[in-house]
Image: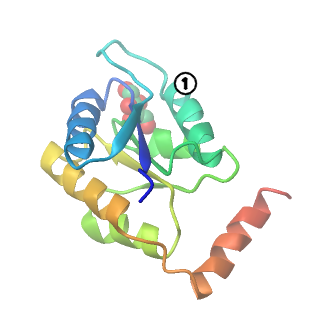
Amino acid sequence: MEKRIIAVGCDHGGLEHKEAIKAHLIQRGFEVKDFGVHENTPVDYPAVAAPLAKAVAARECALGILVCGTGIGMSLAANKVGGVRAAACSEHFSAKYTRLHNDANILCLGGRVIGVGTALELCDLFVDTPFEGGRHQRRVDMITALERE
Ligand code: RB5
C-alpha cells in the first residue's frame, strides 16, 4: 500500500504537541512532513497554516494536523485554502465524525486546550477513520461549491 504522508505544523502554542504527534505518527509507520515551527519563539499561525493547507489541497499530503493555542486560529486560516476542510476538535467524537461525515482533511488541535495524551488519541482517530461517503458526499460537494461563489 502507498505510504500516506501526514503533514504536521504548529505555532508557539502547539510546539510540544506537534513534536509528540510527529514522533507518534513516525513510530506508527507514517511518513510525516513537518511544516514547523521548531522553537518556542512567537510566530503568526497563518504563516504555518497556509503552506501546510496548500500541500494538503494539492494532495501532496494525504492529511494535515495543525496545533496552535486553541486550534481555532489554525482552522480559520487553513479553511481559506480551496479544497481544505479543517476541523478544530478537542474530543474524540468530533475527531472521528469529522472524518466520517465531513471528509475533513486537516485536524486542528489546541495545545492550551487538551493534553498531549488526548491529542495523540485524536490524531489516531483522525488518520484511521475513513470518509463514509454516500449522503455525506453530497454535503461535502455543497461545501466545495461555496468556494466557486
Ligand atoms: C497565540 O498566542 C495564539 O493566539 C494562537 O496560538 C492561537 O490560539 C490562535 O488561535
| Count of numbered badges drawn on the protein | 1
* Quarter placement of the C terminus: bottom right
* Quarter placement of the N terminus: bottom left
**Direction left: furthest residue:** 117
Image x and y of residue 52, in percent: 53, 36
Q: Quadrant of ligand 1?
A: top left
Q: Quadrant of residue 126?
A: bottom left
Q: Residue at x 37, y 38 (%)?
A: 32
- Amino acid type for the residue under numbered disc 1: Ala
**Direction top: furthest residue:** 41
Q: Does residue 79 appear in this view?
A: no
Q: From the viewer's perspective, is 12 left or right of 27?
A: right
Front residue (pair 90, 39): 39
Image x and y of residue 116, in percent: 16, 43
Image x and y of residue 28, in percent: 22, 49
Q: Residue at x 33, y 65 (%)?
A: 128
Q: Quadrant of residue 37?
A: top left
Q: Quadrant of residue 58?
A: top right
Front residue (pair 143, 38): 38
Q: Does residue 53 appear in this view?
A: yes
Q: Residue at x 29, y 16 (%)?
A: 40
Q: From the viewer's perspective, is 49 left or right of 113?
A: right
**Direction bottom: furthest residue:** 135
- Residue 46 versus residue 145 in the image, above or below: above
The colour scheme used here is rainbow
Q: Residues within 10 Å of mark 1 (few under 14, many from 20)?
A: some
Q: Residue at x 24, y 31 (%)?
A: 19
State the SS at label 1. helix
Image x and y of residue 136, in percent: 58, 81
Identify residue for label 1: 47
Front residue (pair 22, 4): 4
